[in-house]
Image (cartoon, rainbow, N blue to C red):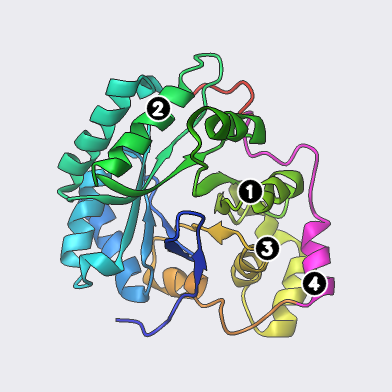
Amino acid sequence: MSDISIPELKMNDGKSIPALGFGTYKLNGSSGVETMVNAIQAGYRLLDSAFKYENEGAMGEAVRRSGVDREKLLVTSKVPGLRHRYNEALYSVEESLYRAGLDYYDFYLVHWPNPSQDLYVEAWQALIEARKRGLVRSIGCSNFLPEHMQRLIDETGVAPAVNQIELHPYFTQQEQRAWHDEHGIITQSWSPLGRDNSAMQEPVIKAIAESHGKSVAQVILRWHVQLGAVPIPKATSPARQLENISVFDFELTAEEMDVLNGLDRPDGRRKDQHPAYYEEY
């Protein structure tokens, strides 16, 4: 077991979230279980999954095999786009629990707003009910724009605790993050290392990494942490898992943060998945 300690951030629902988590997309079956167990033993305490990843069972098995007390782990899943209607969203939470073999989820998110369906408020109301029933402890969104979240707040009185968005040096989401901060919503970063890891080849980031005696990945993840965002990198090798989590023993200067912020691009999204029109099924 690693002795790395990850700082925590306070959320608007009074609970806390680790400042860095572990992504599990495409980690399936027995090899996925092994990879997740290694991550937990390396020190990760936040695991991110989704109904659509079809690996909630593997995640639950990793939790049981990890040797770490369940109460010390925070696990996440998400409502898929086809299940936004109130009853279907509630069933999704229940099915996620059955598949994982867990009594509760620490986080459950609405995966995409799918605005043309106009059902995401129903899905949100279902998560509010799931939280009341003790099926989940904190609720949030993924890929929601400010106008989507504002509608949730206006129509239910409940703000998301987190919103998970694409965020990396090529797509810094400054305005979105500012809106999150204004409303007390934690920003989580998916694809934190950039499009096909191309940001890892940036000479300016390599130079910063060399000056700190760190890897490029560590510099980028540290950038997320100092932005106040929670990155959820995925890594299959134990060495890379340990590398990615070892970012709390150094600090980037204001000038170095500006360098990474300056890599933002108008076309920085990895794919054509703008939440204003993208539909996830």
Q: Which residues are magenta?
A: 253-272
As drawn, 98 above or below 181: above
**Numbered disc 2: secondary structure:** helix
Q: Position of residue 212 (x, y in %)?
A: 70, 83
Q: Amino acid at mark 2?
A: Ala
* Residue at image coords 22%, 59%: 62
Q: Are marks 1 and 4 in contact (CB under 8 Å)?
A: no
Q: Position of residue 207 (x, y in %)?
A: 77, 74
Q: Earlier in the sequence, mark 2 or mark 3?
A: 2
User: On the image, numbered disc 1 is attached to which residue?
Assistant: 183
Q: Is-magenta flag for residue 145?
A: no
User: On the image, numbered disc 3 is attached to which residue?
Assistant: 227
The residues tagged by marks 1 and 3 sit, at their Cα atoms, a distance apart of 16 Å
Closer to the camera in the image, 253 or 103: 103
Q: Residue furthest top?
A: 117
Quadrant position of the N terminus in the picture: bottom left
User: Which of pointers 1 and 2 indicates the residue nearer the eye?
Assistant: 1
Q: Earlier in the sequence, mark 1 or mark 4?
A: 1
**Numbered disc 3: secondary structure:** helix
User: On the image, numbered disc 2 is attached to which residue?
Assistant: 123
Q: Is residue 220 left or right of residue 261?
A: left
Q: Are marks 4 and 2 in contact (CB under 8 Å)?
A: no
Q: Is residue 28 left or right of residue 158?
A: left
